[in-house]
Amino acid sequence: MKLIKTEEELKSLIAADEWMMHILTTVEKLQLPDSWICAGFIRTKVWDFLHKKEYRTSLADIDVIYFDKVNPSEKYEKQYEQELTKYLPNEPWSVKNQARMHVINNSEPYQSSIDGIAHFPEIPTAIGVRLTNGILEIAAPHGIKHLVSGIVAPTPYYQKGSQRHEVYMNRVRNKQWELCWPKLQIVY
């Protein structure tokens, strides 16, 4: 089993996972604008791979994001969650429009879903994947090096000295990722 070094190798890891591809195909059916599945969906797969886990670690949720300035209301997010639940009722769907998340995160408006991803707290969480006409795409505004190396560090927006660093610290403490994946290197 070799290490993952490139986005192409990361795509191959995802493409070989039947469950992930089923999730990606299901989300593609909604045709949401600028949509991605992100965060733990990819992070967990890679960390399980790095730790040679035989079984997939379960997810608290499947984070689906999209960008729609025209319909920023949370009610649309809930409708999309319901649609996804009709397709796959046993999955923990979470849908968020990045055109409104800046309000919740108390920041400047995001310009796209990838801009929203760039503002996630941890670098290995700041990643997205989508399926478009059978082609996998990766959105990694901070690269994949941290993710594939098992390094947890804050994105630039959450660096030490920033007003948001405590959010990063709290997440790292509360998530307790090192209990599930002991080889992780966590930057405090």
Image (spheres, helix red, strand yellow):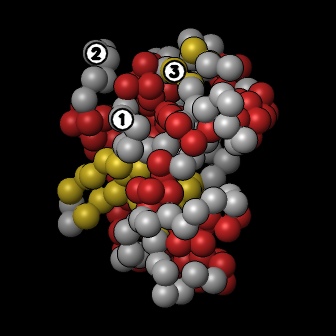
The image position of residue 163, as x and y in percent, is 72, 41
Three-letter amino acid code of the residue under disc 2: Lys
Q: Residue furthest toward the front?
A: 161
Q: Residues under labels 1 and 2: Cα distance?
A: 19 Å
Residue wearing tag 2: 2
The label nearer to you, 2 versus 3, is: 3
- Which residue type carries mark 1? Gly
Classify 10 Å Cα crowding around label 2: few (below 14), some (14-19), many (20 and above).
few
Indicate the secondary structure of the residue bearing disc 3: strand
Q: Quadrant of residue 183?
A: top right
The tag on residue 143 is: 1
Figure check: 55 above or below 103: above
Among the two numbered marks 2 and 3 on one chain, the one whose residue lies closer to the N terminus: 2
**Residue ID at (67%, 68%):** 103
Under tag 2, what secondary structure?
A: loop
43 vs 113, nearest the viewer: 113
On screen, residue 134 above or below 28? above
Q: Position of residue 39 (x, y in %)?
A: 53, 46
Q: Residue furthest bottom?
A: 70
Q: Position of residue 177 (x, y in %)?
A: 67, 26
User: Residue 19 vs residue 8: left or right?
Assistant: right
89 or 73, which lies in front?
Answer: 73
**Separation (CA) of disc 2 from disc 3:** 18 Å
Residue type at tag 3: Ile
Q: How far apart are the two marked residues, 1 and 3, measured between alpha carbons?
A: 12 Å
Q: Is residue 49 above or below residue 14?
A: above
Which circle's residue, 1 or 3, is located before the other in the chain?
A: 1
- The disc placed on residue 151 is 3
